Image (cartoon, rainbow, N blue to C red):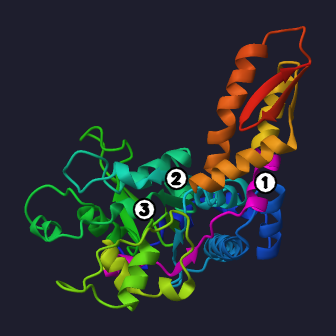
Amino acid sequence: MSPRPDHLQALPFERSDSVRERVAALEVLSPREIDQRLSELGYRGQQEARRAASVLTYRHLQRLRRIHLEGLAPEPGTRENCLFLGPTGSGKTFLVELLFKEILGVPTVIVDATQFSETGYVGDDVTTMLSRLYEAAGGDAAWAACGAICMDEFDKLATSRSDARFAGQQTTKDVSGFGVQRSLLNLLSAPRADFPPDFGFTSRTPPMPLELSALTFIACGAFSGLKHTVEELGGHKERMGFGRETGKRETAIAEKVTDDQLEQTTAFARYGFIPELIGRFSRIVSFSPLDAKTLGDILEDNVLRAYEREFAHEGLTLVVEPAVREWVVARALKRETGARGLRAALVPQLERAAYDHFGEPQVSTVRLVLDGEQVRTVAE
């Protein structure tokens, strides 16, 4: 009997009863319930972004149910590729991890874009993202096809803005990220792709195919300076000679790019991206810089609770006075590093307290107090 034509071939995940059972066991939540679950897990702020991400997660779940439980073929053009854009420490990758790994419970990997290079050069090929997903799925390619990939630091793939990027397109080494962008073009639109199950460490293991129709791909990046690039495109061109403006406008690290500005593909091209690659993203979600109140909530609900538990295991009660909390939030705002700045400001103080009082049975309470502009420890 001759094999069926390729377009009539049964998809790999359609033959997996174990995946069908796994999909049936996934909890069905509405977008509003997903958003509520985020709050329960300690995610704070970003109301607009989390609303969009909750719908994205719901669509992923329903797509899996249609394919595996209802036996429907993936609809063309329904694959989700989403770009999360916002300042560092605004909760982009944390949101992905909570939504897909914790709430939905599908195979999820978060990879750093800076580790990839064009095929054939030092660094990982983009197909190794599928290898990581395969590993996260316990070596089950059908279950991996139900997962999500998050590429962090996506903006670091921006090419040089000089003509040097064009000189290397068909010649030597990819030094600007252009080759990685070209590799991603196919990965973000192909119905299936081959990947090295052993991460390409040997040439003995043949590549395996992975169905991509149900996969959700999310790219995250700060895109520092993109807002300024958009404003430059909408303003006057730089003048040369007499009357030329020599002063350079200082751009804040933590800025929100508006939805109108995100629609300007030309700005992404000027920033250093292939327009076709940006066009592969069906949704671009902008994250806002975290304000003082949201940072205070994150400090209280996420950061401090973890350290309070650690100190409790040592038989100590950790007390961080309100003035110290305000000082930590103010430092994070000044550095424009969002939630990451909270730990950067607080951890050195806690390390000193741990060094001085862990393993000291005569101490029961460790208190952090603000003395002028310095934080000091009081043992009680």
Q: What element does badge 1 sit on?
A: helix
Which residue in the protein does label 2 denote?
A: 110
Q: Residue furthest front?
A: 242
For the residue marked with disc 2, what is the amino acid?
Ile
Does the magenta-highlighted stretch encompass residue 277? yes
Q: Position of residue 55 (x, y in %)?
A: 69, 76
User: Residue 238: x percent and y percent?
Assistant: 27, 84
249, 268: nearer the viewer:
249
Q: Where's residue 133, x and y in %?
A: 50, 52
The residue located at (52%, 61%) in the rendering is 145
Residue 139 visible from this viewpoint:
yes
> Residue at the location (74% across, 32% down)?
375
Q: Which mark is residue 64?
A: none
Q: Secondary structure at mark 2?
A: strand
Q: Earlier in the sequence, mark 3 or mark 1?
A: 3
Q: Earlier in the sequence, mark 2 or mark 3?
A: 2
Q: Which residue is mark 3?
A: 154
Q: Is residue 139 above or below residue 265?
A: above
Residue denoted by label 1: 296
Is residue 25 at least partly visible in the picture? no
Quarter of the image that includes the N terminus? bottom left
Q: Nearer the viewer, mark 2 or mark 3?
A: 3
**Residue in front for this viewpoint, 248 or 302:** 248
Question: In whole angstroms, how far apart are the C-alphas of marks 3 and 1?
Answer: 28 Å
Q: Is residue 63 above or below residue 112?
A: below
Estimate how packed mark 1 is, as few (under 14), some (14 to 19) or many (20 or more) residues with alpha carbons within 10 Å.
Answer: many
The quadrant where residue 23 appears: bottom right
Give the residue drawn at x 73%, y 56%: 295
Amino acid bearing label 3: Phe
